[in-house]
Image (cartoon, grey):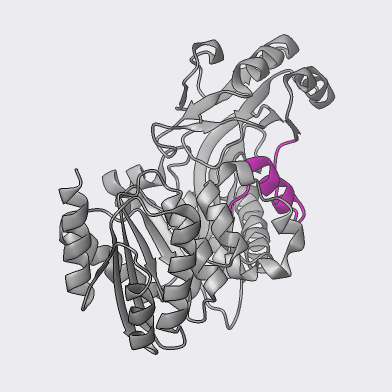
């Protein structure tokens, strides 16, 4: 789960992390009051969307102006103007894709006198099963671009879970960023604060870009991105309350109601599979035969008829889906339960695209019999390779 910048800064502030003062607004008429409360003399007006590259982004609507999604204002009147231009309009960045995202919130923040821009992030390193810091002196830039052009400028180090954060981690971070004296001391404190926040709130990603050194010699987090581990959210109802459904795909929201693992993709073949590994293999073989998956969807090992029905509805709700592949290897998941769920869904929402079903495992004969007796126009497959070829050919033949 992701949250907005202003929410991320509020979370970090609980742990003592230095952030600028700011106010979130949802209506243009609240902009002036927020700016006056902060005091100025300069303000930064920031679009709040779940995507990077906001400053370099462009708005679709001409009335939104051409200054990007992050703007420097030098008067209360300018803050008001930017708020009217940005709120309710669609911002397109390198991460949103051409569709962009509509701006429903703004963050008005005190301006900072910046001497240096740096980069700090914390991630879970799956290869080492440790929390790792990624730091660079090239703050304010896309870290992917830095990694490609000058990889030597990115320093990483891990924290041993047996010891947790230690003073030497702060010294390592300070050296990597070229900080000395009092700034190095501040870096040590910041390292501990960020790590503590990361672990306490079960984050999977915490990115500060840029971390700035101000002209008066202070470290300050000028931007913040946080992602939380979805499986741990039951422990953090206060973080769940920060969820912004307008930033999420409607199909993914619906899937979360039924505890389905669903991710929308850009392809044409909808997939319903049980088990994450089998789902990945199914997506790979679809690509092998020349098409693209429209989603990742794992219904889980113990899916009920209702869950399967919901999954099928979510797939068919995607207008990009031109064919559906159901690939079930029944262990805990029973093939007859899957068949009943699919039939119930088809009867409710209809079937306007080719459907290939591959069943194997527990109660497979019952499942096939249920589908065969349903009268549905379903293409049966013997194995995964056969299923992938049949759905790809069916989709290509329908064009």
In screen coordinates, is 76 left or right of 295?
A: right
Total numbered labels: 0
Tell me residue 381's x, y (percent): 22, 73
Quarter occupied by residue 44: top right
**Magenta span covers which residues?**
1-22
Quarter occupied by residue 56: top left
Instruction: Pick whichever, 136 or 13, lies toward us.
Output: 13
Residue at 52% from the left image edge and 81% from the top image edge:
302
Tell me residue 282's x, y (percent): 28, 68
Residue at 70% from the left image edge and 52% from the top image edge:
12
Q: Quadrant of the N terminus?
A: bottom right
Whether residue 106 is in magenta: the answer is no
- Residue 190 against residue 280 in the figure, above or below: above
Whether residue 14 is in magenta: the answer is yes
Tell me residue 121's x, y (percent): 52, 54
Whether residue 292 is visible to the viewer of this picture, yes or no, is: yes
- Residue 330 against residue 343 in the figure, above or below: below
Residue at 20% from the left image edge and 47% from the top image edge:
398
Tell me residue 89's x, y (percent): 57, 23
In screen coordinates, is 294 left or right of 190?
A: left
- Residue 81 against residue 242 in the figure, above or below: above
Whether residue 261 is visible to the viewer of this picture, yes or no, is: no
Instruction: Pick whichever, 294 or 1, lies toward us.
Output: 294
Residue at 43% from the left image edge and 55% from the top image edge:
315
Q: Quadrant of the C terminus?
A: top left
Instruction: Pick whichever, 390 or 23, lies toward us.
Output: 390
Instruction: Pick whichever, 364 or 143, lies toward us.
Output: 364
In screen coordinates, is 252 left or right of 95?
A: right
């Amino acid at each position: 789960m992701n949250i907005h910048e202003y929410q991320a800064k509020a979370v970090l502030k609980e742990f003592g992390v230095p952030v600028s003062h700011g106010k979130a607004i949802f209506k243009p008429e609240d902009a002036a009051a927020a700016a006056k409360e902060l005091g100025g003399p300069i303000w930064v007006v920031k679009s709040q969307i779940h995507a990077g590259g906001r400053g370099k982004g462009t708005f679709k609507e001409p009335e939104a102006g051409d200054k990007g999604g992050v703007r420097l204002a030098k008067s209360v009147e300018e803050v008001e103007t930017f708020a009217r231009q940005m709120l309710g309009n669609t911002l397109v960045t390198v991460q949103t894709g051409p569709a962009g995202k509509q701006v429903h919130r703004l963050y008005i923040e005190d301006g900072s006198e910046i001497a240096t821009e740096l980069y700090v992030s914390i991630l879970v390193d799956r290869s080492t099963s440790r929390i790792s810091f990624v730091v660079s002196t090239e703050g304010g830039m896309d870290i992917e671009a830095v990694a490609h052009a000058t990889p030597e400028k990115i320093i990483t180090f891990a924290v041993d879970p047996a010891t947790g954060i230690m003073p030497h981690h702060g010294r390592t971070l300070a050296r990597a960023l070229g900080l000395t004296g009092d700034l190095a001391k501040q870096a040590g404190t910041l390292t501990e604060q960020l790590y503590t926040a990361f672990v306490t709130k079960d984050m999977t990603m915490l990115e500060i870009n840029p971390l700035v050194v101000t002209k008066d010699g202070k470290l300050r987090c000028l931007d913040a991105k946080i992602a939380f581990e979805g499986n741990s959210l039951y422990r953090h109802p206060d973080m769940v309350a920060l969820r912004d459904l307008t930033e999420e795909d409607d199909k993914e929201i619906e899937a979360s109601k039924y505890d389905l693992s669903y991710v929308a993709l850009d392809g044409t073949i909808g997939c319903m599979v049980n088990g994450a590994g089998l789902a990945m293999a199914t997506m790979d073989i679809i690509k092998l035969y020349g098409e693209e998956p429209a989603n990742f969807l794992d219904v889980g090992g113990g899916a009920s008829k209702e869950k399967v029905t919901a999954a099928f509805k979510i797939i068919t709700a995607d207008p990009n889906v031109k064919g559906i592949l159901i690939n079930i290897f029944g262990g805990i998941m029973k093939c007859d339960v899957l068949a009943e769920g699919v039939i119930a869904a088809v009867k409710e929402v209809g079937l306007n695209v080719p459907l290939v079903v591959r069943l194997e495992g527990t109660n497979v004969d019952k499942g096939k019999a249920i589908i065969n007796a349903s009268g549905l126009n379903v293409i049966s497959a013997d194995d995964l390779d056969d299923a992938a070829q049949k759905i790809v050919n069916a989709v290509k033949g329908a064009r």
